[in-house]
Amino acid sequence: MCHAPDTLACLTHFPPDWLRPQWPAPAHVHALCTTRTGGHSQPPYDRMNLGDHVGDDPHAVAANRGVLQAALQSVTPQAQAVFLQQVHGTQVVVLEPGTADGVVADACVSTQPGLACTIMVADCLPVLLTDGAGTVVAAAHAGWRGLAGQGGVGVLEAGFERFSALRHVYQAQAAIKNIANEGAGACASQTLAWLGPCIGPQAFEVGAEVRAAFCAHNPAAAPYFQPHGAGKYLADLAGLARQRLQALGIKHIYGNDSSAAWCTVAQGSRFFSHRRDSAALGGSGRMAACIWLG
């Protein structure tokens, strides 16, 4: 069954078509994903471009980031989105007070209230994580390179390792009985994941080398690549991410179900798409997915 992307219609301080995960996270865990709505940029970055590396007017980007910060702070005073320098890798950073924008990483983790783990996307998949108690949050930038990683260890595996370790430390310090010795499987069973919009399986044409990067270490990835002629395949990026999360033991997965409603290429009026717009229009903006503790 296909589900339309979750919206923020119930929260009037956000543009109504921004996305809010519909998941059973604790009330003090907050998350959102921006769309094209609500900003100041001119075409082809119209209007809510948050990327400062794509050729947009820096003043417009700064104003757009101000819109995002105001939205976060309308929920949690003093909340702050921390932007990474994403490189399609597997590096993970733990956000601390004073962490500046621009740290080179493709995932971030935090237990600090108000520090918003923030990932920018425009076809790649944003993945947000929290645990059932709301002690830790994480965000990952899952393009195909980072998702595949090396030797079967990609950005989701690396991010979940840091997420689990931080959860253990936090709960051990809180003196919760037996949690300090909790295994990764127990942590996974209590983890919630939300997948945001990304390029869909009807639009994501890739070469045989992309399929090989996944299937060499995980033959079960093969069904997520459909032949598309001349050595090409249509890849299901969100499906591949769901499979990797499930392999980690994470079963509570929400959001993007690979339907057209979540496809950045298909939903041109709502989502930025690097693949759709860069060649045709000369550039594309970036959306942001954020998760933070209130």
Image: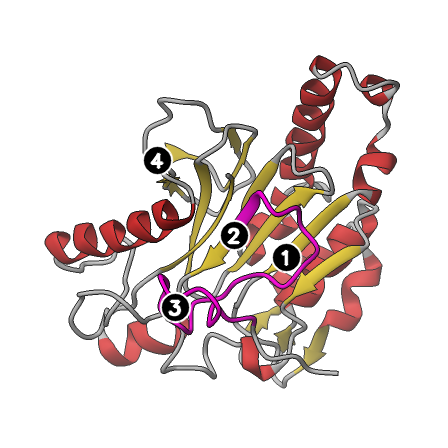
Amino acid type assigned to the residue bearing label 1 in the image: Trp
Measure the C-alpha gap from mark 4 to mark 1.
24 Å
Amino acid type assigned to the residue bearing label 2 in the image: Ala
The residue pinned by badge 4 equals 78
Q: Position of residue 294 (x, y in %)?
A: 50, 39
| 230 is higher (above) or lower (below) than 64 | below
Where is residue 258, by image quadrant? bottom right
The residue pinned by badge 2 equals 31
The numbered mark, 1 or 2, whose residue comes first in the sequence reads 2
The residue pinned by badge 3 equals 35
Amino acid type assigned to the residue bearing label 4 in the image: Gln
Measure the C-alpha gap from mark 1 to mark 2.
10 Å
Q: Which mark is residue 239?
A: none
Q: Are marks 3 and 4 in contact (CB under 8 Å)?
A: no
The reply to whether the magenta stretch includes residue 274 is: no
Q: Secondary structure at mark 1?
A: strand
Quarter in which the N terminus is drawn: bottom right
In the picture provided, is 173 more to the left or to the right than 37? right
Q: Would you call the spot at circle 4 few (<14 residues within 10 Å), some (14-19), or many (20 or more)?
A: some
Q: Are marks 1 and 2 in contact (CB under 8 Å)?
A: yes
| 279 is higher (above) or lower (below) than 158 | below
Q: Would you call the spot at circle 1 few (<14 residues within 10 Å), some (14-19), or many (20 or more)?
A: many
